[in-house]
Amino acid sequence: MKNSISVLITASPIPSHPSPIVLQTVIQSIRDHCPSLLDCHIVLIFDGCRVAEKPMSKLGKVSEDQLEGYRTFVQNTTTCLIRNWGRRDTNNWIDDAWDREAQPPEGSELPPAPEIRCYKPTIPETKFPPMPELRATHRVATVDFPAVTCIQVVGERLGQALAVSEAMKFVETEYVFACQHDWRFNADIDVGSFVNVLEETPSMNYLGFISRRTKGYARQTHPRGYPQAAIPSGILGIPFCRSFFWFDKNHIARTSFYKNSVFAEPFKRGDFIEDTLGQKLHAEIRIHGMDAWNKWGLYLYYPENGELCVLVHVNGRHYLSVDQRHELERLGRMSREE
């Protein structure tokens, strides 16, 4: 399976940095619930940011302290993944692998030293904000370790859509498991079975997962004038329903679909796929029904009739120190007063 699917993770500044606890929690959930992904090439892109008087991390605006914390997080995370991704001799990514020097598992050698290259993203040139530089750190695959690619956007942010587009240039497998840095897995994922379903179902291009807000999705959408979302018999014995929206949170997709269909859309810096393309196809399906849905082929894994939350959001604010909480409150008050 490692030759069929890659892992792609997008990360951006959050108030809890430089602590890696949020991303650690997500990676630990991969280790616990879909360990076969540890054998696959991982591509992690760290979006850019800039210092602003009114920090808003979702918009790539941070304070001086947050910028320093984010830089530390990026450096430490890159070092950790280059050293440790693919190892199965640790049971806890949170307490064990993050900070230690890599020691080769018995019978294997250390992973090779990474290669580093810098380049400009292939997006339309803009005078403001200035074009960022991308710094890619890549560890080639060996018999014992899969490939690792960590990409840092040096400069102002690209936004989720363009960050994924740049990261996808390093994905060479037929499928990609795209994850966000703050969504963890809450149930076991048999990735091999899902890859088999994709291979046997050419019309399936995207496979998402249920979270708290999408529980009972098939029941939520049908009364609102959309086509029937439920698929009573599932596909190859696995429960699925149709999705009438593109959710950015963790999903599996065909790489060719991403590159040829999703990124055929004219995304701008700062865009999120679900806020642009997602809204567009949502409207198309509501008007044109199954004819529109058939062009996209979006599905959700639907265990327990959509009541099992396979994904859970990891809120970084829960891990802030008292001083960090007070600073965020102060900045929030300043913003409201102005």
Image: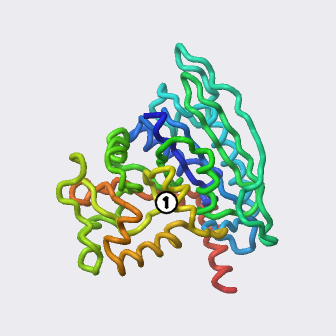
Looking at the image, which residue sits at the far left?
Answer: 233
Query: Where 280 sits versus 145, above or below?
Result: below
Looking at the image, which residue sits at the far bottom?
Answer: 338
Task: Tell me the crowding category of disc 1: few under 14, some 14 to 19, or many 20 or more residues within 10 angstroms, Cα based.
Answer: few
What residue is shown with label 1? Answer: 315
| Color encoding of the figure | rainbow
Looking at the image, which residue sits at the far top?
Answer: 107
> In terms of secondary structure, where does tag 1 sit?
loop
Residue drawn at x 41%, y 78% is: 283
Query: Where 262 sits versus 102, above or below?
Result: below
Position of 30 with respect to 215 (left or right) is right
Corner quadrant of residue 132: bottom right
Amino acid found under the numbered disc labelled 1: Asn
Point out residue 103 in the picture as x, y percentages from the top left corner: 60, 22
Position of 200 with respect to 120 (left or right) is left
Q: Which of these two is toward me, 294 or 40?
A: 294
Residue drawn at x 63%, y 22% is: 110
